[in-house]
Amino acid sequence: MNLFKEKDQMNIQTPPPLAERLRPTKLEEFYGHEKYLGKGKLLRRLIDKNEIVSLIFWGPPGSGKTTLAKIIARSANAKHYQISAVDSGVKELREIIKLAEANKYNGVSTLLFIDEIHRFNKAQQDALLGSVEQGVLTLIGATTENPSFEVISPLLSRTKVIKLEPLTENDIRSILSNAIKNDEYLKPLNLRIDSDAEQTLIRSSGGDARRLLNTLEISSRLLGQNSNISNDIVSQALLSNHFVYDKKGDAHYDTISAFIKSIRGSDPDAAVYWLARMLEAGEDPKFIARRMIILASEDIGNADPFALVLADSTFAAIDKLGMPEARIVLSQAATYLASTHKSNASYLAIDKAINTVKNGDSYPVPLHLRNAPTRLMKDEGYSDGYLYPHDYAGHFSDQNYLPPELNDTLFYEPTTEGREKKFFERLSGLWKKHKRIDPDD
């Protein structure tokens, strides 16, 4: 649990991965994020003065969140602990808080680093609140997800969020050069790199230092001493270094796309298969649940209004349960959404209405629909002629609610699927005079 255990005796035949060998241990070795770490900048000043506050590092994979947290921990005059929210829970948190309380009693500060803090549910995050608020420990969290959505507000208000962008091409180029020239295993190989191969490595990294170094390491294994790293070698390395599921890469978006399209296509078997693929790859259950909330309105809508209620409840249940139990809730929601009736009528309606407004069709509100809270407004004709629907048979009054210029415009066209069929039948009967809906179309 301690962040800084002594290194084990290194086996010469099986060295650590290149990315781990080159992980910076002090700020002078760290590349990028000058707006926070440059001379006189906020984070640099806090580190130099040993006045670390609770922080959350938010950024994409390979941007240096974990490395920076470890550097800060090493520089701070405090006991250090590290856990991952993936495989830790309230029990581990309470153990660390107990140690932190003892440390505080003995005049020693405590720093806790939580990797992937967004994976903690509300109850787990609540367990941290008191100790952070009372100064029992200083928290440093790392997350690839937006903290505004993934970290509870009381905890977020007690931390400073540092947003780390992907590393720049210059940063990546410097890391690449340093690896070839200074790594204890690569340096003896005396490797050279073609300019086009260098550019391919840099661009394929996407600002992710770990991805860059993984690809470089594979490239080096394909070569002998005094060899040249060509673009062909890098291309081969990129193929062998294919990321089966990178939460920020193509597979992430391809798999969620397959999942959503399977639900939209009413195939519950395909939906649970892609769901399983995402969960086994470590995808955030909340990300999946959020996408199902969108789908419930966009692709199901009024054909089954309960779908939105279920999707929203799924998100809430996941927040309470966490994994692995969340998989059951996600499966229930996915199979329900896939199996129920579908309609995109509401989605099409709002987009058509927005396009109408964007095209300049922003007409005045008809007088009979305007609010008339004062005598002057009534004298001006506001609300005059409005027919209160509940005073009429069927709680319907035959009057226009759109600007006169749009009276014949049709935005919402209900389908005959599921519950929406009742809407179709009712609205067809109500609006025959205005031809708003024609049952024979």
Image (cartoon, grey):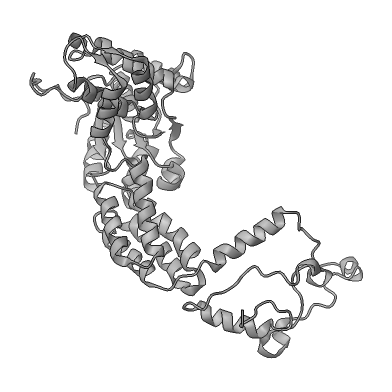
Q: Is residue 357 above or below residue 374?
A: above
Q: Quadrant of the C terminus?
A: bottom right
Q: Is residue 29 above or below residue 332?
A: above
Q: Nearer the viewer, residue 399 or 265?
A: 265
Question: Residue 138, image x and y in percent?
Answer: 35, 32
Q: Residue at x 54, y 82 (%)?
A: 422
Instruction: Determine if residue 221 is in view.
Output: yes
Position of 191 with respect to 154 (left or right) is: left
Q: Quadrant of residue 361?
A: bottom right
Instruction: Determine if residue 20 is in view.
Output: no
Q: Is residue 202 above or below residue 298?
A: above
Q: Residue at x 19, y 12 (%)?
A: 184
Q: Quadrant of the N terminus?
A: top left
Q: Residue at x 20, y 9 (%)?
A: 226
Residue farthest toward the front in the current orientation of the protein: 232
Q: Residue at x 50, y 62 (%)?
A: 298
Q: Quadrant of residue 336?
A: bottom left
Q: Quadrant of residue 338?
A: bottom left
How many numbered marks, from 0 up? 0
Q: Is residue 18 above or below residue 332?
A: above
Question: Residue 248, image x and y in percent?
Answer: 37, 40
Position of 349 with respect to 246 (left or right) is: right
Position of 427 with respect to 172 (left or right) is: right
Question: Residue 439, image x and y in percent?
Answer: 61, 82
Question: Residue 39, image x and y in percent?
Answer: 47, 13
